[in-house]
Amino acid sequence: MGAAERGIWKSAEMRRRLAAEGLEISAGKMSSWWAGTPPTIRLDELDVICSVLRKAVADAVRNDQILT
């Protein structure tokens, strides 16, 4: 689900796409998101992630696995 459905296979590519949408995040934070173990994701971050992945925020919250 998530990133792979959009042809995003590496965390660096996802990070680049997030930055293109105005969300600059650290490599460490991206690593935890990519591994599926984020301590937190702010709502504004979730909004950009969902925009990049073309998913509804409600679907992402229900699924619990946004990028994986």
Image (tube, rainbow, N blue to C red):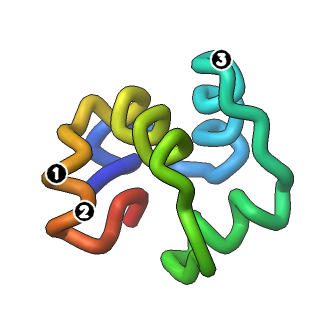
Residue 40 % position (x, y): 58, 71
State the image coordinates of residue 62 (x, y, percent, origin top left): 16, 67
Q: Which quarter of the picture shows residue 47?
A: top left
In what element is the residue under mark 3?
helix
From the image, which quarter does the C terminus lie in? bottom left
- Looking at the rendered structure, the secondary structure element under dot 1 is helix
Residue 68 — which label?
none
Residue for point 46% across, 40% down: 49
Q: Position of residue 31 (x, y in %)?
A: 71, 67
C-alpha separation, residue under disc 2 versus residue under disc 3: 23 Å
Q: Amino acid at mark 3?
A: Ala
The answer to whether the residues at label 3 and label 1 have Cβ atoms under 8 Å apart is: no
Compare marks 2 and 3 and give the one earlier in the sequence: 3
User: From mark 3 to mark 1, how far is it between C-alphas?
Assistant: 23 Å
Q: Which residue is mark 2?
A: 61
* Left or right of 20, for residue 27: right
Q: Position of residue 29 (x, y in %)?
A: 75, 63
Which of the 4 quarters of the picture holds residue 67? bottom left
Mark 3, residue position: 20
- Quarter residue 51 falls in: top left
Q: Which residue is mark 1?
A: 58
The residue closer to the viewer here, 10 or 25, is 25
Instruction: Report whether 2 appears left or right of 55.
Output: right
Q: Do the residues bearing badges 2 and 1 touch, measured as CB atoms within 8 Å?
A: yes
Q: Residues within 10 Å of mark 1 (few under 14, many from 20)?
A: few
What amino acid type should be assigned to the residue bearing mark 1?
Ala
